[in-house]
Image: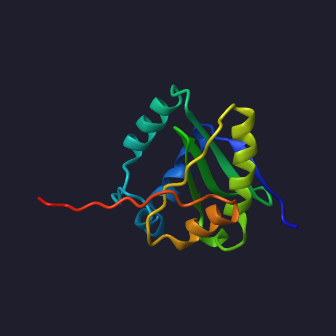
Amino acid sequence: MKQISLRRVDKNDWDFILSLRNNEKTRDNFYTKNIIKKQDHYKYLEEQEKNQNFFNWIISYENVNAGYIRILENDVSIMIDDKFQNKGIGTTALNLVEKEAKLLGIKKLVGRIMVHNNQSKKIFEKNNYNLLMYWLEKHIS
């Protein structure tokens, strides 16, 4: 079996995370779809470093950066590099993060997924997450 592991993020990883976040396919799966500027990304991560409810890891596959996973206020977000998708990496990484969350004293994790994001839906379902609500919205301006 291929080696999948997590390691805590440091500043040297911030450009990698930004490249994942700004990937067109990834952006399509986020609520905010705009391209993030490097200075805004760095400012956000600097602020989050002070947040007691923010934890983040680089996902490694065979000792190569394959993705990113974070917990923010119990919300889990996963981004996998295109060339590493459909290999079970996200599913395994979520399982590993659940173990980390237990060590951190976190009692509940939530996955908020865009309706069309079937890959993420599968990852959370494989890890026994339950659908609890639908979120409907309408832009009226």
Residue 9 image-quadrant placement: top right
Give left or right: position of 70 versus 7.
left
Task: Answer with the quarter of the image where residue 7 lies.
Answer: top right
Q: Position of residue 50 (x, y in %)?
A: 51, 25
**Camera-side residue: 57 or 136?**
136
Q: Quadrant of the N terminus?
A: bottom right
> What percent of the width, then of the height, locates residue 21?
48, 56
Q: Nearer the viewer, residue 118 or 57?
A: 118
User: Is residue 37 rendered to the left or right of residue 119?
Assistant: left
The residue positioned 48% from the left and 37% from the top of the image is: 45
Which quarter shows the C terminus?
A: bottom left
Vertical order, 101 against 33 (above or below) = above
Front in this rendered view, residue 36 or 119? 119
Q: Quadrant of residue 14?
A: top right
Q: Residue furthest right?
A: 1
| Image position of 1 (left or right of 32) | right
Q: In the rendering, at what x and y percent does residue 104 appear? A: 69, 32
Q: Position of residue 95 (x, y in %)?
A: 73, 53
